């Protein structure tokens, strides 16, 4: 397993890096967890999904199984306290839900929304310190979800 993520990347940037960052490793499976920087930065959901689709097409053209993971939500109250992070737009949940709904319709996907959302659909306070990034416990949840998915699907055997 190789983490190819870059902090702050949008799905546009992820899509642009596919050939240079993914293909040299010739993976059988690619876990794609992206989108949080889109909807927190005012990129609309259909654009995020358009990038997801393009990444999926690139995967299929290179015999890579694309596995999309739902992005974590954000917590605007905590983000407001973190001076280094811009506030998400008021309609961020609309774009977040649009992206998550598309992901949940894919043949291969990992849905972590229930574990990360509070009762209002925001990132749970106990899984972040800044309202944007999952903390150590949040990352453990993500790791367990990926491990469970691989154990269930047996795609690498």
Image (cartoon, helix red, strand yellow):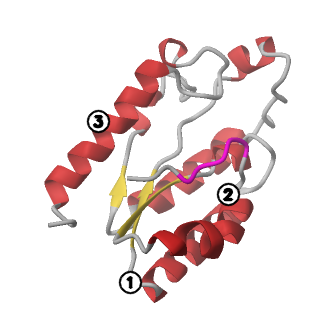
Q: Is residue 156 left or right of residue 140?
A: left
| Between 83 and 117, the one nearer to me in the picture | 83
Which quarter of the picture shows residue 84? top right
The image shows a total of numbered marks equal to 3
Tell me where residue 135 appears, x and y as whole percent: 52, 21
The quarter of the rendered structure image containing the C terminus is bottom left
Q: Nearer the viewer, mark 2 or mark 3?
A: 3
Badge 3 is on which residue? 144
The magenta span reads 4-8
Tell me what residue is drawn at x 67 percent, y 57 percent.
45
Badge 1 is on which residue? 63
> Is residue 50 visible in the rendered structure shown here?
no
Residue 21 is inside the magenta segment: no
Tell me where residue 74 appears, x and y as whole percent: 63, 30
The answer to the question of whether label 3 and label 1 lie on touching residues, with beta carbons closer than 8 A, is no
Tell me where residue 17 appears, x and y as whole percent: 67, 67
Q: Is residue 69 above or below residue 132?
A: below
The answer to the question of whether label 2 and label 1 lie on touching residues, with beta carbons closer than 8 A, is no
> Is residue 116 visible in the rendered structure shown here?
yes
SS of the residue at dot 2? helix
Q: Who comes first in sequence, dot 3 or dot 1?
A: 1
Q: Who comes first in sequence, dot 2 or dot 1?
A: 2
Q: Is residue 81 left or right of residue 136?
A: right
Badge 2 is on which residue? 45
Tell me what residue is drawn at x 81 percent, y 37 percent.
89
Q: CA distance from mark 2 to mark 1?
A: 27 Å
């Amino acid at each position: 397993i190789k983490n190819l993520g870059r902090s702050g990347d949008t799905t546009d940037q992820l899509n642009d890096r596919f050939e240079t960052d993914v293909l040299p490793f010739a993976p059988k499976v690619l876990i794609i967890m992206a989108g949080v920087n889109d909807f927190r930065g005012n990129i609309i959901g259909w654009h995020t999904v358009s990038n997801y689709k393009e990444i999926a097409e690139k995967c299929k053209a290179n015999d890579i199984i694309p596995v999309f993971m739902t992005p974590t939500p954000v917590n605007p109250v905590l983000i407001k306290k973190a001076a280094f992070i811009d506030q998400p737009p008021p309609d961020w949940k609309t774009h977040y839900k649009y992206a998550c709904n598309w992901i949940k319709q894919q043949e291969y996907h990992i849905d972590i929304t229930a574990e990360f959302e509070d009762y209002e659909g925001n990132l749970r306070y106990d899984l972040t310190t800044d309202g944007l990034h999952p903390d150590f416990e949040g990352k453990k949840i993500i790791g367990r979800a990926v491990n469970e998915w691989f154990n269930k699907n047996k795609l690498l055997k």
